[in-house]
Amino acid sequence: MAFTRRDAMKFSGVAAAAIAVAGCTSSSSPEAKGGAAASGSSVGVGTKAPLVDAKGPRVVVVGGGWSGLSIAKYTKKFAPNADVVLVEQRAEFISCPLSNLWVVGAVDLEFLTHDYLQAARENNYTYFNATVVGVDKGAKVVQTSNGNIDYDYLVLAPGIDYDYSGWTKGDIALESRLRSEYPAGFIPGSEHLTLRNKVLDFEGGNFIMTVPGGNYRCLPAPYERACLIADYFKREGIEGKVILLDENNGITIKAQGFGSAFKELYGDYLDYRPGIKIESFDLDKKTITDDFDEVIPFADAAFYPHVRGAKILEIAGVAKDSVFNKQEGNINPFTYEVIGETNIFVTGDARPMGFSKSGNTSNSEGHYVAKVIAGKINGNKTEWESPLTVCYSAISVDPTQAISVNAGYAYNEKTKAFAFANAATNEIWKGKTGSNNGKALFEWAKGMYRDMFS
């Protein structure tokens, strides 16, 4: 499936939207207290955003991903008197779940792309297209590239950023090359486009991919991607091999299903190596050296580093180093409230709990956080509800066959951590079972899109 001019136009808005972190300021700086960015030159910062004055308590949701969209919709549903504003820097939504199928040409970009304005119209809240550059917690002001927004309640749902420090040891030039030449492809936008072009233009040799340690975005996604790229090489007769270097000692989820697919379907096209870390890169020679001192050449690659909370959490002064990843939200794990704050929440993939960093998890969590916020507005107490992880992973595309997991979470008082509870898996990708899961994958996606955008 060729990449079309229409596809390029759809991606243009995403590619153009990026936070210039160097120009941001924390709420503790002298400049931030006055409501202006540190440079004093950001467009709109220090002026009031062009929004109608709120007629009820204003809830500002920063981040239009699976969590933010759900919170915006359901806060308005549960507290109709609230004035809900969703601040998102992208001009359109492009889904990370199912993007692996788009990378190998199995679905159209239209299936992943959705309209923020439609979601806001359908659910009676405001979509505000801007980049958040600071938060003044004392004044209860969100500073954006298009002016300041007062809030009564603030939700930060900014997703992940990448943490290259374990690989680069502070080498900014190396990090820049890894980000631009070999992007991970787990933040929607240009890096997905780069990855797709890499795969569709691949002529042969080793294609290296990595699985990071810790709690990274969507545990099964790197294994699904490896299957689908190997499937593409196999179908197209490309003399290439996916080398999947996994920091973990084994497949982190759906191990039976992925393991059998690696061996039975893609034995000649996929080389899975668990318990391997990259020690060094030579990008000019196109080689990496692993922690067993093996030098591995590659024709192309997508290097997925560890993840961390997005930079805005540091800028807002609500981040901490967590058990799993750096600089995630410093929150009460049952209410999502920032420690020391009663009106600021951190949700989605930026939370520190060990929940799956996946779409369905963030969506179901968003329903609960919306109840918490609405309960505060309405004077009601909200009982904790577990998020739900429903995840389908495609194994092949012709026909689409998939494996799945469906699980909630329970809190362990001894370990002071959350773990899967009542988990049900279907890891048989062969025959009718796998095909039925393949159909369910698309029905699940349609249902999720309806929930967020209709």
Image (tube, helix red, strand yellow):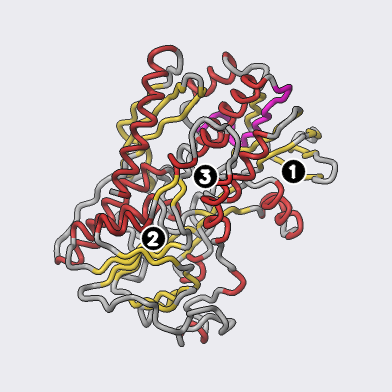
The residue pinned by badge 2 equals 346
Badge 1 crowding class, 10 Å Cα cut-off, few under 14, some 14 to 19, many 20 or more, is: some
Badge 3 crowding class, 10 Å Cα cut-off, few under 14, some 14 to 19, many 20 or more, is: many
Q: Secondary structure at mark 3?
A: loop
Percent of width and height locating residue 344:
34, 67
Q: Secondary structure at mark 2?
A: strand
Disc number lying in front (1 or 3): 3
Q: Earlier in the sequence, mark 2 or mark 3?
A: 3
Q: Amino acid at mark 3?
A: Tyr
Measure the alpha-carbon separation of dots 2 and 3.
17 Å
> Seen from this angle, which residue lies furthest front?
5
Percent of width and height locating residue 54:
25, 76
The residue pinned by badge 1 equals 279
48 sits to left or right of 380: right
Q: Earlier in the sequence, mark 1 or mark 3?
A: 3
Q: Is residue 347 above or below residue 191?
A: below
Residue 64 among magenta residues: no
Badge 2 crowding class, 10 Å Cα cut-off, few under 14, some 14 to 19, many 20 or more, is: many
